Image (cartoon, rainbow, N blue to C red):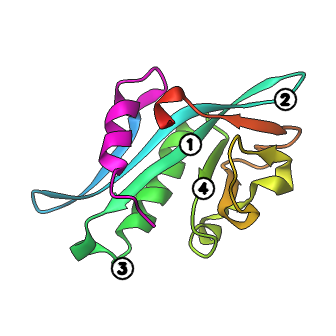
Amino acid sequence: MSDHKEQFLAERLRKSNSFIPKLSLVAVKGVKVVGHILLTKLEIKNKQQLFESLSLAPVAVLPAYQHQGIGAMLIEQAHKVAKSLGYTSFILVGHENYYPRFGYKRASTFGITFPFEVPDANAMAVELVENGLAGISGEVKYPKEFF
């Protein structure tokens, strides 16, 4: 699902302190950019602690290039790069039938909540390393640029 305003979100996030240039990836066919994924820093906060994680948003593929595995390739590459940079988890709100194939589970499984109303099936998290979310629980704190 899209509100067709993801480009504005990406623009705001690129200008924020949460932006990580190495986690802004593109897919190219010939000389044409056909897909993009952006990961930015976020926090998971509870009464005692603050944990760093990443938000996967947005991921986009031009309509003419969808259903060709480009989105999957971007997600898998983003996992590899983030892991190499020392990150241990991602948080996202997404389609309940798409993201589980990449290891995403309901965020509630880890005791992670969101600061807005979202169906449990669409609020997800993934551990990039074994036990990457072990002992981590709390509410997701998105950068202000998301709102």
CB atoms at circles 1 and 3 under 8 Å apart?
no
Q: Which residue corresponds to mark 1?
A: 55
Callout 4: SS: strand
The residue indicated by pointer 3 is 67
Left or right placement of residue 83 versus residue 38 in this view: right
Residue 85 can be seen, yes or no: no
Picture residue at 41% right of the left edge, 55% below the top: 59
Residue labelled with disc 2? 46
Element at label 3: loop
Q: Nearer the viewer, mark 1 or mark 4?
A: 4
Give the amino acid at mark 1.
Ser
> Which mark lies nearer to you, 3 or 2?
2
The magenta span reads: 1-20
Secondary element at tag 2: loop
* Residue 37 drawn in magenta: no
Q: Could you say where residue 106 lies in the image, as x and y percent from the top left?
A: 75, 60
Q: Amino acid at mark 3?
A: His
Check disc 4 and give the amino acid type.
Val
Contact, mark 4 vs mark 2 (Cβ under 8 Å): no
Q: CA distance from mark 3 to mark 4?
A: 20 Å
Q: CA distance from mark 1 to mark 3?
A: 23 Å
